[in-house]
Amino acid sequence: MARLGIFDSGVGGLTVQKAIFERLPGLDTVYLGDTARVPYGSKSPEVVTQYSLRNARFLMAREVDLLVIACNTASAVALPALRKEFAIPVLGVVEPGARAAARASRSGRIGVIGTPSTIASGAYQRAISAARPDAKVIALACALFVPLAEEGWTDPDDEVVRAVAHRYLAPLARADIDVLVLGCTHYPLLKGALAKELPGVALVDSAEAIAAEVAERLAGGVVGTAAHLFFVTDTPDRFLAVAERFLGRPVAGAEQVDI
Ligand code: DGL
């Protein structure tokens, strides 16, 4: 029986958990949201790696068999450090998302959006080029999409959402991309607005891409009890208030831990 450990800087990783639930409804999971230290997307690689190691050690103590880094920023900068420290398989969202984009693109012109730290790391750009050496990658940081999604401002017809999406995505609209990688946990909530701004562009959700990879890894071996534990590092109130929008179902409770 497999037990999956999954962590994120906060609530956003629940989009990844949602995609995993859809594929593997019986899986047992332990989720940690580092809500005391969020956001990671504006922090240095050193600090994000240090936080990620702490998160992973906490989950390892809960005897997980597979570790998923749901946070794109942590996946982009901390994956090698985590793989070095832990013997169990550690999966990040960047590689599956990059491979899915490389497969989906006809023209090889691929856009990537993420937090400033994810984009600055160059991790998506490298992973896409590794999967498809002829690719032309246009990567853009879109810092304001995270607070918009948490605030629930995701309606594609909302004037603020439209204005922010237009301002960020205009260079991509001009760049003639045919695929856009949603390289941040929060962006699936903004799919409607992104699609409206970039008609005809295929949106690759790194949450779905990693869920497919987890399902592949655990093929045939998932006979869990669908038991789900949630931990947070700040008081749970805000996490619980917004969790349902990210997970697609309510989270009954989350335990605050000091890690
Ligand atoms: N979870 C982060 C990511 O996917 C977004 C929120 C943050 O900046 O911590 O990059």
Image (cartoon, grey):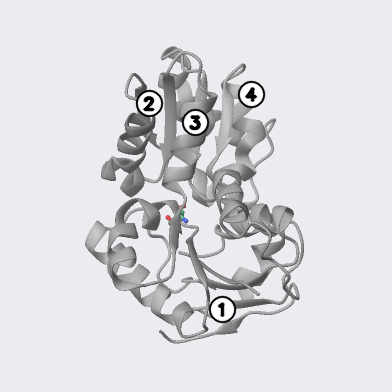
Q: Is residue 136 above or below residue 62?
A: above
Badge 2 amino acid: Arg
Q: Quadrant of the C terminus?
A: bottom left
Badge 3 amino acid: Ala
- Tag in front: 2 or 3: 2
Cα–Cα span, label 1 and label 4: 35 Å
Closer to the camera in the image, 122 or 251: 122
Q: Quadrant of the N terminus?
A: bottom right
Closer to the camera in the image, 190 or 86: 86
Q: Residue at x 33, y 41 (%)?
A: 119
For disc 1, the marked residue is 231
Closer to the camera in the image, 257 or 2: 2
Q: Residue at x 51, y 15 (%)?
A: 106
Cα–Cα span, label 3 and label 4: 19 Å
Q: Are marks 3 and 1 in contact (CB under 8 Å)?
A: no
Badge 4 amino acid: Lys
For disc 3, the marked residue is 101
For disc 4, the marked residue is 196
Element under disc 1:
strand
Report the image quarter containing ligand 1.
Answer: bottom left
Q: Residue at x 74, y 72 (%)?
A: 226
Q: Dot 1: few (<14), some (14–19), or many (≥20) neighbours within 10 Å?
A: many
Element under disc 3:
helix
For disc 2, the marked residue is 132
- Tag in front: 3 or 1: 3
Q: Is residue 183 visible?
A: no
Q: Quadrant of residue 240?
A: bottom right
Cα–Cα span, label 2 and label 1: 38 Å
Q: Quadrant of residue 24?
A: bottom right
Q: Residue 181: x and y, percent?
A: 49, 34
